[in-house]
Image (tube, helix red, strand yellow):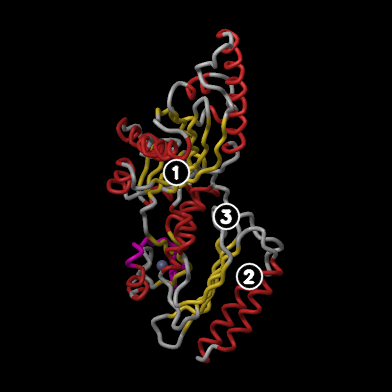
Amino acid sequence: MSGNAPLDRLRAQRMLEQLESLQGRGTELVSVYVPPGKAVSEVMNDLRNEWGTAVNIKSKTTRKNVQDALSKVMERLKLFKTFPPTGVAIFAGNIASDQLGVGDMQTFVIVPPEPISIYYYRCEHQFLLDPLFKMLSAKDIYGLVVIDSKDAAFGFLKGNRTEMIKQYSSGVQGKTRAGGQSSRRYERLRDMHLNEWYIRLGGYFTEHFRNVPGLKGIIVGGPGPTKEDFLKGNYLHYELKDKILAEIDTGYTGPEGIKELVNRSREIMKDARYYDERHAVQEFLRHIGEDDGLVTYGEKEVFQAIKGMNVQLLLISEEVRRTLFKLKCKSCGAIENRIVDNDKVVEFESTLSEVKCSKCGGSVDVLGKEDLIEAMVEAAEAANIKVELISNATEEGEMLLRSFGGLAAVTNYRTF
Ligand SMILES: [Zn+2]
């Protein structure tokens, strides 16, 4: 794992797209989801049982394929002493190909970016991928808090899903005192209790939000001035202060208030979510505008710049769907790259005999093929280059794809 969350996510996404296109001839593609905390031995036992049950499958071919797939999964499982902190998903099966009767036994292992919450085994015509697709679509996490002097509600927004964490009540009395108490004493006591409430709130913020990977920001709401008083005071952990995106007035507190908060802050969250992406493309465009020569774009040019250690910031559109072929000339041995759109790959491979070496015109062999983005990212990581993945959700992202082919770089020195 590179430890780069957006890239890990994109890789998982690409792998799922690839798996989605695969079919078994019979009900024979095996999917296994293991949540964190399971013992390897327990999962092995369950799969051994499934292997035994598969004896009852009527079709001889299907039976053999299912058992082979289960054996492959168990082989992979044996490589784990314990499972990763997010669990693991393993897929195996005999992949149907165009040539009748010729199948290809393949195994795929995915360590997901977030914990798997289900434990199951399935055997179907296709791999079962929904749980992972759903996980990946829940991209960003926001903290949500609604407070007033009486209570507080904490929640998350994960993708489009709102999740309540916990509610607390302050125990602070209302502004109007009961008869008989001295008004100054009442005020003083109330302030003291409010101060204690704010200190408690600060603790809850830390408890719920400080160690949340992928937390993009926190939005604080509530009726009245309590939220402002709390945020102005020195009650929040300094790391969380920087995460506060907005204070928003709501009519409600509690779960109703959280819902209201989500509805009122859509725009703010959208801005925060795409801030880094837009910022990166804008920097690229600024260099273009100033014509200072500190940019390059296009596959060949960008690869060249990476190779020459001349990239400061690499921009890759998530929408690029291309494959990089590494070719070797059969006559002169020269090695060269060819980049082909994914939907043209089959055609390219079937007409390989017409592809000629650009040096001597000889025919070529394929040394390897790889997803273009994957190849770019690997090269960039090896050279310690900062990579920003750009979605199509912003105008800047669309422009990167439309006008610059989806691949661009800010360079260290002039290239032209
Ligand atoms: Zn050649």
**What's the residue type where badge 2 is placed?**
Arg
Residue 23 spot, x, y in % from top left: 43, 76
User: In the picture shown, does residue 392 fall above or below 32?
Assistant: above
> Label 3 crowding class (10 Å Cα cut-off): few <14, some 14-19, many 20+?
some
Question: In the drawing, what numbered circle is on residue 373?
Answer: none
Is 264 drawn above or below residue 227 in the view shown?
below
Query: Can residue 265 be seen in this snapshot?
Result: yes
Q: Which quadrant of the render holds ligand 1? A: bottom left
SS type, badge 1: strand
Which circle marks residue 115 in the picture? 3
Measured as percent of width and height from the top left, residue 107 is found at 55, 72
Say what amino acid the circle numbered 3 marks.
Pro
Q: Mark 2 and mark 3: span between their CA atoms?
A: 19 Å
Give the mark, 2 or 3, whose residue is nearer the N terminus. Answer: 2
Name the residue tied to disc 1.
388
Q: Residue at x 31, y 33 (%)?
A: 291
Query: Quick check: is 339 in the magenta stretch?
Result: yes
